[in-house]
Amino acid sequence: MKDNAIAVVSANFGGYDTVKFLPQVQEAGIDYFYVSDTDSVLEEATQKGWKALKCDWDGVPVPEWAIPNANRYKAKAVKFAPWAFPSKEYRNYVWIDASMTLQSYWWQSALNYLGVGDLLIHKHRERDTAYEEAALSSLRPQYADERTALLQAIVEMGAVNLPTTMPLYEAGFIMRRHTARQDDLARIWWQAQEKLKTTQDQITLAWALWEAGIDVCTFPFTLPDNGKASQIMHLDFHATEKETR
């Protein structure tokens, strides 16, 4: 595992979600980091075996368009460039959403599917393109404050000739080798978010992958539906989603 050392990074700002347990079986060379601005969340993460990292966001302005979804916006900094937070370098970085619990031995399948590639991710389980995702997201309650921006994103993507054949990916689990190309992707992904003014990162990821020219490796299966498990992870609803069901 030394040559394939992995940092798994998750984030939860404002106590948005519950802290998930780590895999029952763990492997030397894999460290798990939990980033938050909330002391109680960090304390819970530490109790469950995560390496807690406090990020106060002090002095970093949240743009006006993102203020209604400030906690979601803050988490994107961790998601887009997870290597910026642990204090040492790792060969591979895995982002997982706060709604996910990794299964034991998850890394065996993940490293196998990544191979010699740069990035491993799931193809979207339901939709094919960012255009479709933008249209549907504009109708979702959690993106109500970004509805106009999401509809405008369809126009913007067409204006830069984002191909309608560009695949759509789920962004809940992303494994990346830390190379200069990944730094470029993080920068372009953030720029796409600021240009389109949306925290719907599946849309901006499609834009960023296309612009950066990143070769993508995909799992041979889609992300499990909420409440189900795969050989890699168990996916649950976000805590705030459960409250509305």
Image (tube, helix red, strand yellow):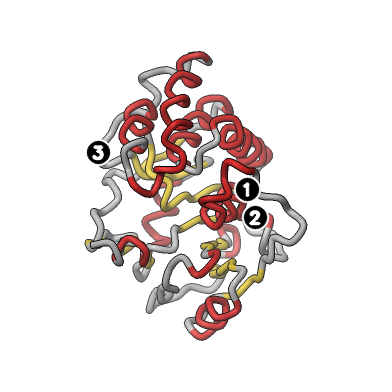
Q: Nearer the viewer, mark 2 or mark 3?
A: 3
The residue identified by callout 1 is 178
Dot 2: few (<14), some (14–19), or many (≥20) neighbours within 10 Å?
many
**Observer able to see residue 92:** no
Amino acid beneath label 1: His
| Residue 226, x across and y down, in percent | 25, 58
Residue 40 lies in quadrant: bottom right
Which residue: 55% across, 26% down? 213
The first of marks 2 and 3 along the sequence is 2
Amino acid beneath label 3: Glu
The first of marks 1 and 3 along the sequence is 3
| Residue 240, x across and y down, in percent | 37, 63
Q: Is residue 219 above or below residue 233?
A: above
Which residue: 64% across, 59% down? 90
Which residue: 35% across, 28% down? 129
The residue identified by callout 3 is 126
In the image shown, does 72 or 205 lie closer to the viewer?
A: 72
Q: Nearer the viewer, mark 1 or mark 3?
A: 3
In the image shown, does 131 or 123 lie closer to the viewer?
A: 131
Amino acid beneath label 2: Trp
- Indicate the secondary structure of the residue bearing disc 3: loop
The residue identified by callout 2 is 83
